[in-house]
Image (cartoon, rainbow, N blue to C red):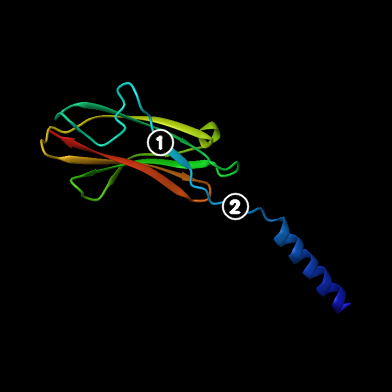
């Protein structure tokens, strides 16, 4: 009887290991929107200028949907502050687009770093960032 129980346990263990899917661990995709009035690379802007930075993100694996999107802003290399944080679900979990609008400060010589981050179901993170120097 003990051998039969051990055999059943071993069989369950083996079946459990082989039934697990292998997760490829591919990072979610995120890119800047380009064209029009979008800023998509580091640049210099006039003090008090209105800026538009757009991103497009999408899942890279069928089951690893996008779960979170954040925008952080850092001034002159200081620690970044989260200015936007969205939990994603539904269709946004497959693909997400966002346009970030802001009027930059009137501080000539200041550098603003904007970081756009997307996180998927597995907790894998990808991000893009750019610097805007205020003239």
Q: Please tell me whether mark 1 sits on a helix, a strand or a loop.
A: strand
Image quarter where the C terminus lies is top left
Separation (CA) of disc 1 from disc 2: 23 Å
Q: Which of 60 and 122 is in front in this view?
A: 60
- Which residue bears the numbered disc 2? 23
For label 1, count other residues whose C-alpha is less than 10 Å away and answer few (under 14), some (14-19) or many (20+): some
Residue drawn 18% across and 46% down? 76
Choose top left, top right, bottom left or bottom right for residue 73.
top left
Name the residue at 38% across, 44% down.
127
Across and down, in percent, residue 53 comes to 32, 30
Q: Which mark is residue 31?
A: 1
* Identity of the residue drawn at 21% across and 50% down: 78
Q: From the viewer's perspective, is 9 left or right of 57?
A: right
Return the residue found at the far top: 36
Q: Which of 18 and 50 is in front in this view?
A: 18
Callout count = 2
> Which numbered disc, 1 or 2, marks the residue that appears first in the sequence?
2
Nearer to us in this view, 76 or 131: 131
């Amino acid at each position: 009887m003990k051998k039969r129980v051990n055999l059943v346990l071993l069989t369950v263990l083996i079946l459990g290991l082989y039934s697990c899917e292998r997760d490829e661990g591919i990072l979610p995709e995120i890119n800047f929107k380009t064209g029009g009035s979008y800023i998509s690379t580091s640049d210099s802007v006039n003090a008090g200028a209105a800026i538009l930075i757009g991103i497009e993100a999408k899942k890279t694996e069928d089951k690893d949907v996008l779960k979170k999107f954040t925008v952080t802003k850092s001034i002159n290399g200081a620690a970044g502050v989260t200015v936007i944080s969205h939990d994603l679900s539904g269709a946004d979990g497959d693909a997400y687009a966002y346009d970030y609008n802001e009027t930059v400060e009137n501080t000539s010589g200041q550098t603003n770093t904007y970081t756009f981050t997307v996180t998927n179901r597995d907790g894998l993170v990808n991000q893009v960032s750019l610097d805007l120097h205020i003239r």
